[in-house]
Amino acid sequence: MFKFLIKTISTFFYVGYFPLIPGTAGSVAAVFFFFLIKNNPTTYLITLAALLILGFLTSGMAEKIMRKTDPPCVVIDEVCGMLIGFLFLPYDIRLVIIAFVIFRILDTLKPYPISSFEKLKGGLGVMSDDIIAGLYTNLILQAVVSFTSFSAA
């Protein structure tokens, strides 16, 4: 039961077992999840905090269960990173699409210092690079919103 729970959470309800590009599948799942919680800021923040805690706890355990460092099927880190990318932005479908693209590029290319966080051990290493990619995504989009006509819909 314990292994089942770890795998279920760390793979975000088995989305991580999508046969092609599981990280992108996790990011897409995060977008759908975002649509469910976007209208309630309190729910959004509590959910994000819970997912971050669960991600740190389960991703390191999943590495041990699967006997692999940062297994591709562990996508709770992508889910958290995407949700951070959307944090405190006005809702606009264009921003959602742009955030998705920016996050996937940053998560794939891992520019400095994202790459150095990935080298940390256990859940900290699994989660940190995606959290930083999400923060970068959010900062970029906060600047875009500040200097363009994007506003709350």
Image (cartoon, helix red, strand yellow):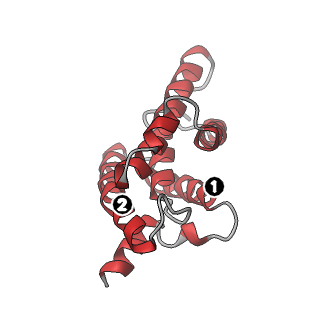
In the rendered structure, find residue 87 and report the number of the disc placed on it: none
Q: Is residue 138 left or right of residue 102?
A: left
**Secondary structure found at label 1:** helix
Residue 12, image x and y in percent? Answer: 47, 66
Crowd around label 2: few <14 · some 14–19 · many ≥20 (10 Å): many
**What residue type is disc 2 on?**
Gly
Location of the N terminus (image quadrant)? bottom left
Task: Please say if 151 is above or below 10.
Answer: above
**Secondary structure found at label 2:** helix
For disc 2, the marked residue is: 60
Location of the C terminus (image quadrant)? top right
Distance (Cα) linking label 2 and label 1: 20 Å
Q: Is residue 17 left or right of residue 119?
A: right
Report the residue at 63% width, 20% height from top: 149
Q: Is residue 76 left or right of residue 124?
A: right
Considering depth in this image, is 38 or 132 the residue closer to the camera? 132
Residue 127, image x and y in percent? Answer: 41, 49
Residue 140, image x and y in percent? Answer: 56, 25
In the rendered structure, find residue 24 and report the number of the disc placed on it: 1
Rendered image quadrant of residue 151: top right
**What residue type is disc 1 on?**
Thr
Direction right: furthest residue: 20
